[in-house]
Image (cartoon, grey):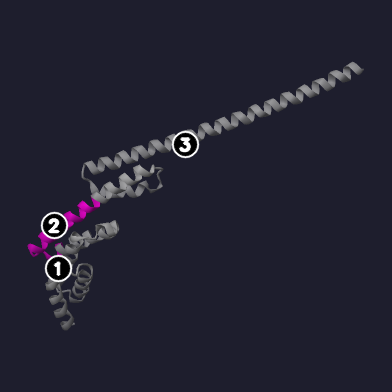
Amino acid sequence: MLLCAAFYFLYTDRAGDAEAERDNALAARDAAQARAEGTARQLAAREAADRASAGLLELLRQRRYRDAIAAHRDLADIELGAAQRQFLADAVAGARSQLVADATLRARQAFDRRDYQRGHDLAREGLTLTAAGGPALEGPASAELRYVLAASLDKLGRAAEARDAYAAFLTAAPDHAMATRARQRLTRLERAL
């Protein structure tokens, strides 16, 4: 009987050890699986970021600037490295700057052809791009766009809007080459209204 009791206690002690080892092994397996799944998610996120970055750079290479700007907005939720994010932001800022320059040229050409509505539309589009690009895009091109917008509104007979646009132009670019002419037109429009 004593021998049976000793074997029983020995068995339960060893069984308890085996259960503890099994529980430890299961916990280690679960932890390893969780690490593997986490690593797989990180790898998938990194591959998605690389594909999205490559797609954006391809759009820029093809000079599809509007599509690139839209694709850049979609990158906000994608995990990118700080350097990669900054590089893409700089590239998109350059694309936006090019679009503003193109809009400025086309708006000026439309105005010179006396297509005032087209000049107005192109100037407004360029100013929208400038506003979306932030202070970095404020400069000679945006000043030119403001002047074309004001002058187009003036030529279209939209005096109140032209007055406001001339005032905005003079506020943004008081030393511009066309500032004197804008002040003269603004004074006349204020007297007429």
* CB contact under 8 Å: marks 2 and 3: no
- Residue 131, quarter of the rendered image: bottom left
Q: Could you tell me the amino acid type at mark 3? A: Arg
In this view, the residue in front, 38 or 134, is: 134
**Which residue sits at x=17%, y=57%?**
103
The kind of secondary structure the magenta stretch mainly shows is: helix
In magenta, the rendered stretch is: 95-118
Image mark for residue 152: 1
* Residue at numbered disc 3: 41
Distance Cα–Cα, label 3 vs label 1: 54 Å
Tally of numbered discs: 3
Q: Residue furthest right?
A: 1
Distance Cα–Cα, label 2 vs label 1: 14 Å
Classed neighbour count for the residue bearing mark 3: other residues with Cα under 10 Å, few (<14), some (14–19), many (≥20)? few
* Percent coordinates x, y for residue 64 in the rendering: 23, 46
* Residue at numbered disc 2: 105
* Percent coordinates x, y for residue 51 in the rendering: 34, 37
**Which residue sits at x=14%, y=63%?**
119
